[in-house]
Image: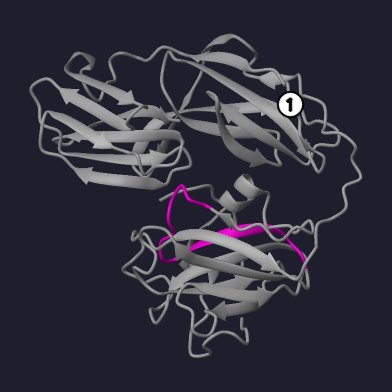
Amino acid sequence: MKKITFLLFALMVFSFTNLSEAQCAVDTAEGPYTNFNTSFGGAPCDDGSGSPFNEITAFESWADEAYLMDNIISGYTYTFSLCNGPGAGSWTPSFTIVAPSGAVDAFGLNAGSTCALTWTATEDGTYTIVISEEGVACGFSTNQSTDNGFPAITGTDGENCAACEELFPPSCTTVIEPTDNAIDVVTTENVTEGVSSRQVSLEWDAVTGADAYEISFDGVVLGQTPNSAINIYGLDYDTTYTWSIAPVNCAGVTSGCATWTFTTETENLSINDFNQNSFSHNFNNTNSTLKIESRGSTFTSIEIYSITGKNVLSKQLNDSVETINVSELTDGIYLAKININGNSKTIKFVKN
């Protein structure tokens, strides 16, 4: 379905909730997804100027899924919501807030709310937020692919940021794989949500003092990871890519680090979804349109996915020349799976 996945726990209660609501176990939800951690470094931190409102707008949440949230602080009050976005209010959610120990801090919704739950954390660390549909058995919602608002979190209670003792961001990493200007880099197949593409593992030496690493790929910042390796998919054969790693600590993100290049291996031409001479595509960044053209065949459908695997657009087609408007998508790297009578081809485009 989407995003970036990890591992999960179990569930409990809260005074603002409707106690008739059922708690939902983690194994009834897809994920948990790590987008809040890669995009924002986890839970919001109030530096004294107010708590940020961290909202993911690249996609909307569906029923029966879950998110991981790093850096929750015991005693601090948070609010998770699905109140904004084109699909907000499509169905009524119910949230279950799972502490690192597996205990449940809260579940349901705030009194009088149809989209938000506030709770006070009982533990430090990584929490799991499970999203189900109110009044529906856990894992059995019919809205598991229905957009229902941008996932968001904010906090109250005043200043809670840990003091930073670092004077400067970390130094840049120098040892990497693939090496700079490497050619014929071997890829492996990745299939996400039925979309097949090529995958490469990017690796680098850990840097002393780095808490995380910001990854940029083909000029687009993908997010941050605490690890010193990541798999990147959505790649093509015989294509040159650029990437860079900027180490991060509490003093900030390192600037001026090198940008590296690698080129993937050549495709075995006996394997082709479409005849390259019968299909063309062009993405126009000026008006945010993707034009596809088939010589002699009629397109049947298109599915567009973010590079993290989220289906952000699906559309039925019925012509040999189609123009798809993607102006509502946020800037980033996307994969488009284009179908013609049971055959398919996946292409990549960058919206910026």
Q: Which residue is mark 1?
A: 255
Q: Amino acid at mark 1?
A: Ser
Residue at (25, 36) in percent of width and height: 324
At which x and y percent is residue 1? Answer: 40, 51
Residue at (32, 38) in percent of width and height: 326
Residue at (38, 41) in percent of width and height: 305
Asked if residue 71 lies in the magenta stretch, the reply is yes
At which x and y percent is residue 264? Answer: 48, 16
At which x and y percent is residue 193? Answer: 37, 45
Depth check: give the residue in front, 290 or 65.
290
Asked if residue 271 lies in the magenta stretch, the reply is no
Please indicate whether residue 49 sits to the left or right of residue 105 in the image: right
Which quarter shows the C terminus? top left
Q: Which residues are magenta?
A: 56-73
Please indicate whether residue 294 sits to the left or right of residue 313 in the image: left
Q: Is residue 11 visible?
A: no
Which quadrant holds residue 122? Answer: bottom right
Depth check: give the residue in front, 218 or 199.
218
Please indicate whether residue 43 sits to the left or right of residue 26 in the image: right
User: Considering the numbered disc 1 on the image, is that residue within a helix, a strand or a loop?
Assistant: loop
Q: Is residue 162 visible?
A: yes
Count of number-bearing discs: 1
Depth check: give the residue in front, 148 or 131.
148
Q: Residues within 10 Å of mark 1 (few under 14, many from 20)?
A: some
